[in-house]
Every structure is written in structure tokens, then in C-alpha cells.
């Protein structure tokens, strides 16, 4: 068992020593900081609803959205759903919470498609590169079966996917905290779900969103693994 | 005779229509350095690939300390350290990181052992440099270090002298001799240059077109007609007179090499020839003889290597 663990750590070490892996992470860092800057400048993320007049503010916002809709027809779809969301806050008498690090983390779920892409790149190279470098010969002349070596590579790709996803999550939180501040330990938010609007905890959304993406990623890798190696 | 380390038993390899290895059988004993010599395309690398399990024999088998490479691969390969073809390592890692990588694949290799092999191959200085910066000779040394990590009973090196300077070859020769004599390791070295490994081998197998055409102990006297002849180099004056005596009385065809006459003869005839020359008032300044080299015998054996 410890032997197998060493094989997996060998694979991870090889992956993370390579410059191309570092480039991937630098791209992710750039995108996350860029997204935070964009969110900062294009969305009103201040704590504008934290006064007692938040109801009037929401109503005023709805009026503005409606008049905008009349002038620009293409805004209709987006604005109607924003108005519906604002109405949900008003009808249920929920005071909207300000935008914070956790909301930013939640929105960055989108980046997980990029994580899938990076994982595919790593998975595609992990066997092929050994042939390219000629090092496959030195791997196969050890008292370790071919299957075990391939399995260790497969597990290391899974770990790469998991580590990268964790990186996106944590780094988004740090960048979010710097840009938008930490807004409570367990903020809630109104989201449009399949059965209409719901008032949900952001943490729950993060857990289910990232969890779902991770499972997706693993299933995709499993298919790749089947196609590649056997 | 000491214990067999590796046995090749009627080894055959066919790839498609090509019959690459034909009924190869020989044994390498513990503590013996075995040179596998043959021209390009003779089948040295193919044989070595089968020895380390990178290629399956079409027929026949290889036994390593009694374990079949076919049916008992793990037990067999555990005793083997090898470089196959070029010493390829991970270019983006340092020498040390590469060795650590292979050390993790076999249980029980300590950091001390790693340092020991680094010292043995003389890579202490560049060990923390990335392998992509290494010269071919440095990679060759790192390859040997990698092969020695787990203290194998059999060391297989495909063209280890490739890319090494004369000093490097001399060093390798020394520690290969050392491994064989002190640690009883069986060493198999392939090369197409006999001169480079002649001095470090106990036994040489000559392979041509996938067949073993000769096998011979390096120090055993050679029995064939041709090799009984020795080359005599003679410095004499007057040189023309000496040459004509050799030509007329003995039917030699002496060659002029500056002021030296060179001809081939049977060793036992040398004293009488010199006596004859002296009787004819020829001054002899020096005489030396060289054994007809193994190299020449090798070329006689090989002839032209034709891939069928
Ligand atoms: N995968 C293969 N498929 C078909 N033929 C092959 C294959 N590998 C080697 N050969 C053939 O087998 C023969 C022996 O090749 P091998 O590489 O063993 O020679 P070698 O003695 O190592 O030569 P060199 O001194 O050039 O390294 C060659 O004729 C080669 O063309
Ligand atoms: Mg070769």
C-alpha cells in the first residue's frame, strides 16, 4: 500500500514540477482576479440595502428596470427576471444581503469547466509524455505491474482535478474577501431554481455546485481512462 | 564455474516478417562482465529489451537467477538494473529528483545509497541541475546511477560508452570491473565498438544478423589459423636490403612504415629471421611484435552485416 502511495506521489511530483502546470495555475489566478475586478466595476456590490429604506430602494430599482425595458427591447428577458427577484424579496419581506467573498466563490463555479479542460490536458499527457521522453522504459523495468503504474497515474489525475478545484474555491474566497469583504459567516441569497425562487444559504449552494462539478469531472475522467488505457 | 546469473534459452524474436533474433542461447555468470558486440542492426538492443521484459520473446525464455522473465517477471526484474538505448530521464527535473523518483519505485533505497551511487558515477557537482542541461556523458552517468540504485545482481547497459570521453570510458571500465569483482555483479554491456569494451569484458559474444556467431573469453588464446600470426615491426639498416631479404628468402610482403618494416609471421620463426638478417650485416635497432588484435578477428567474423 505504501508502495502504491509512493507511485501516486511520484506522478503528482512530476505533474507539479513541470512549468506547463504552473502556467495553468497562473492563468486561473489571472482569471479570478480579473473576474473580481470586473464584478467590482460593473455590479453594484456595496451594502446599499443595509439601511431601513431597502424596500423603497428595491421599488425604485424595479421602476428603473421597467423604463429601461421600454427603451431597449433586448433587455426584456434579463430585466423581467431581476424584477421578479426583487419582488420576491419584497413579498417575503427579506432584506437583501450585501455581496461578499462567498457570493464571489459561488459565482466562480463557472470556472470549473476550465478546471475540466486543464484536467483533460494533464490526463492526455500523463502516459503519452512518458513515451515522448523515453522514460516509459525505466518505469516498466521495475518490479511493478503495468496496471499498477497506470492506476497510479489515473489516481494522480483525480487528485490533480481535486486540488485544482480546491484551489479555485479557496483562491476565489481570498480574492473575494480582499475585493468585497467577508459578509457574514453564512449569508443567504434568493436564487431562481427549477421550481421558482428560493431563499437559500450561499454555503449550501457552493457545496452542491462544486460537489456536482467534481462528480462530473470524475465521470468524465473515468471515460477518458477507459478510452485511453484499455 | 560460478553460478549462472542470466540464461538465454533458444531465444527467438519475430516482428512481422522480420526474423530479428534467431535461436540465441548463452549464459552469463555472476561476477562476469559480458560484452555483446555487433554492428548496427545486429539485434543487441532487441535482445536487451527482451532481457528486461520490454519485449516478449516470440519463443524461448530468459532466466534471471532461475526466475523466468515470462512467468515470474517481478522476481526476475527485481535483480536487474538497466539502461536501454539512450539514457533518457525527465528533462525538467534535476539529477537528484530523477534518482529520487526511481528510488521511490523500489522499497528500501536510502538517501545514503543514492548519495553513494552519485559519488560512484562522479555526478556530485551537477546533481542539482536540471537534466535538460546535462551533456550526453552526464546523462549516461545518471542512467548508470539509476540502474545501480537498488544494488541489482545483474547490470545491463546498452552502449554505455556512447557519448563518453576517453577519461569517462576509463572510469566506467574501472567501476564496472569493481562491481563484477568486488560485488559479484553480472554485467552485460553492448557496443558496436569492440575496442571500447574489450578491456572491461571477461567474455565477448559476437552477434550478427540476430545470431550468435562467436563467443569467447577475452584472455583465452585464440585458436584459429589466422590469429597465430603476429605482426613484427622491425627497425633495420639498410632498410631496402632487409626488405629484399624478407621478400626473397621468406616470401613475406613487408610494408614500409617510415624506417620500420612490418610483416606477419609465426611467432616461433622470429629468432631465426633475425639471425638471418644479422648474418647479412643488417643492423637491427629494434624489434617489436603485436598480437593480431581481437578487433581484426571481430571484423573477420562479422564481415558484412546484411539484414535479411
Ligand atoms: N519494433 C521493430 N519492428 C520491426 N523491426 C525492428 C523493430 N525493432 C528493431 N527492429 C529491427 O531489428 C533489427 C535489430 O535492431 P536492434 O535495435 O536490436 O539493433 P542493434 O544491434 O541494437 O543496433 P545498434 O547498434 O544500431 O543499436 C534491425 O534490423 C531493426 O530494423
Ligand atoms: Mg541498439
Image (tube, coloured by chain):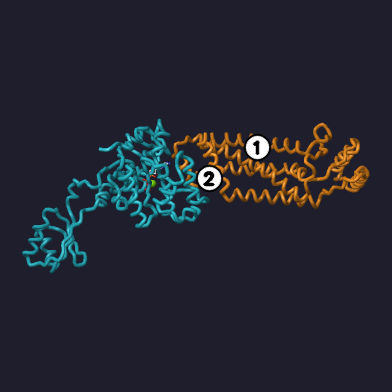
Chain colours: A orange, B cyan
Looking at the image, which residue is at 49% across and 53% down?
Answer: B128
User: Which one is nearer the viewer's eye here, B224 or B254?
Assistant: B224
Q: Position of residue B125 (x, y in %)?
A: 45, 56
- Residue where numbered disc 1 is placed: A217
- State whether residue B102 is above or below residue A198: below
Q: Quadrant of residue A215?
A: top right
| Label whose residue precedes the other's in the sequence (2 or 1) | 2
Q: Quadrant of ligand 1?
A: top left
- Residue where numbered disc 2 is placed: A129
User: Which one is nearer the viewer's eye here, A48 or A62?
Assistant: A48
How many marks can you see? 2
Q: Label 2: chain?
A: A
Q: Position of residue B99 (x, y in %)?
A: 47, 47
Label 1, residues with CA under 10 Å away: few <14, some 14-19, many ≥20: many
User: Which one is nearer the viewer's eye here, B252 or A207?
Assistant: A207
Label 2, residues with CA under 10 Å away: few <14, some 14-19, many ≥20: some
Amino acid at each position: 500500500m505504501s508502495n502504491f502511495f509512493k507511485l501516486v506521489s511520484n506522478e503528482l511530483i512530476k505533474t507539479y514540477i513541470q512549468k506547463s502546470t504552473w502556467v495553468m495555475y497562473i492563468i486561473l489566478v489571472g482569471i479570478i482576479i480579473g473576474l473580481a475586478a470586473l464584478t467590482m466595476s460593473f455590479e453594484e456590490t456595496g451594502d446599499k440595502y443595509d439601511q431601513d429604506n431597502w424596500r423603497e430602494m428595491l421599488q425604485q430599482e424595479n421602476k428603473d428596470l421597467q423604463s429601461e425595458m421600454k427603451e431597449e427591447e433586448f433587455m426584456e428577458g434579463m430585466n423581467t427576471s431581476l424584477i421578479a427577484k426583487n419582488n420576491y424579496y419584497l413579498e417575503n419581506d427579506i432584506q437583501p444581503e450585501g455581496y461578499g467573498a462567498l457570493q464571489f466563490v459561488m459565482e466562480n463555479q463557472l470556472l470549473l469547466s476550465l478546471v475540466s479542460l486543464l484536467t483533460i490536458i494533464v490526463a492526455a499527457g500523463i502516459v503519452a509524455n512518458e513515451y515522448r521522453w523515453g522514460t516509459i522504459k525505466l518505469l516498466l523495468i521495475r518490479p511493478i505491474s503495468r496496471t499498477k503504474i497506470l492506476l497510479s497515474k489515473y489516481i494522480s489525475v483525480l487528485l490533480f482535478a481535486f486540488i485544482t478545484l480546491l484551489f479555485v474555491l479557496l483562491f476565489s474566497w481570498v480574492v473575494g474577501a480582499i475585493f468585497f469583504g467577508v459578509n457574514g459567516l453564512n449569508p443567504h441569497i434568493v436564487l431562481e431554481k427549477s421550481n421558482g425562487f428560493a431563499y437559500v444559504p450561499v454555503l449550501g449552494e457552493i457545496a452542491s455546485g462544486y460537489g456536482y462539478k467534481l462528480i462530473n469531472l470524475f465521470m468524465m475522467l473515468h471515460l477518458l481512462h477507459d478510452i485511453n488505457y484499455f | 564455474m560460478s553460478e549462472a546469473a542470466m540464461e538465454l534459452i533458444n531465444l527467438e524474436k519475430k516482428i512481422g516478417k522480420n526474423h530479428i533474433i534467431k535461436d540465441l542461447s548463452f549464459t552469463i555468470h555472476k561476477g562476469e562482465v559480458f560484452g555483446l558486440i555487433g554492428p548496427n542492426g545486429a539485434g543487441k538492443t532487441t535482445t536487451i529489451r527482451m532481457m528486461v521484459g520490454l519485449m516478449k520473446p516470440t519463443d524461448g525464455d530468459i532466466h534471471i537467477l532461475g526466475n523466468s522473465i515470462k512467468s515470474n517477471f517481478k522476481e526476475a526484474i527485481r535483480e536487474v538494473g538497466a539502461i536501454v538505448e539512450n539514457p533518457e530521464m525527465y528533462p525538467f527535473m534535476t539529477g537528484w529528483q530523477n534518482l529520487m523518483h526511481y528510488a521511490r519505485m523500489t522499497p528500501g533505497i536510502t538517501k545514503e545509497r543514492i548519495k553513494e551511487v552519485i559519488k560512484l558515477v562522479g555526478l556530485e557537482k551537477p546533481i542539482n541541475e536540471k537534466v535538460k542541461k546535462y551533456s550526453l556523458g552526464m546523462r549516461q552517468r545518471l542512467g548508470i546511477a539509476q540502474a545501480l540504485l537498488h544494488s541489482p545482481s545483474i547490470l545491463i547497459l546498452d552502449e554505455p560508452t556512447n557519448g563518453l570521453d576517453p577519461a569517462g570510458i576509463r572510469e566506467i571500465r574501472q567501476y564496472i570491473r569493481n562491481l563484477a569483482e568486488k560485488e559479484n555483479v553480472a554485467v552485460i554491456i553492448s557496443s558496436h565498438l569492440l575496442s571500447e569494451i574489450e578491456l572491461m569484458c571477461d567474455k565477448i559474444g559476437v552477434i550478427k544478423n540476430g545470431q550468435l556467431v562467436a563467443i569467447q573469453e577475452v584472455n583465452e588464446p585464440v585458436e584459429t589459423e589466422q590469429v597465430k600470426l603476429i605482426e613484427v615491426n622491425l627497425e633495420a639498416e639498410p632498410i631496402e636490403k632487409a626488405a629484399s631479404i624478407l621478400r626473397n628468402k621468406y616470401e613475406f610482403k613487408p610494408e614500409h612504415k617510415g624506417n620500420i618494416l612490418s610483416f606477419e609471421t609465426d611467432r616461433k620463426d622470429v629468432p631465426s629471421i633475425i639471425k638471418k638478417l644479422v648474418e647479412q650485416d643488417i643492423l637491427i635497432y629494434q624489434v617489436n611484435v603485436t598480437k593480431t588484435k581481437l578487433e581484426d578477428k571481430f571484423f573477420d567474423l562479422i564481415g558484412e552485416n546484411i539484414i535479411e
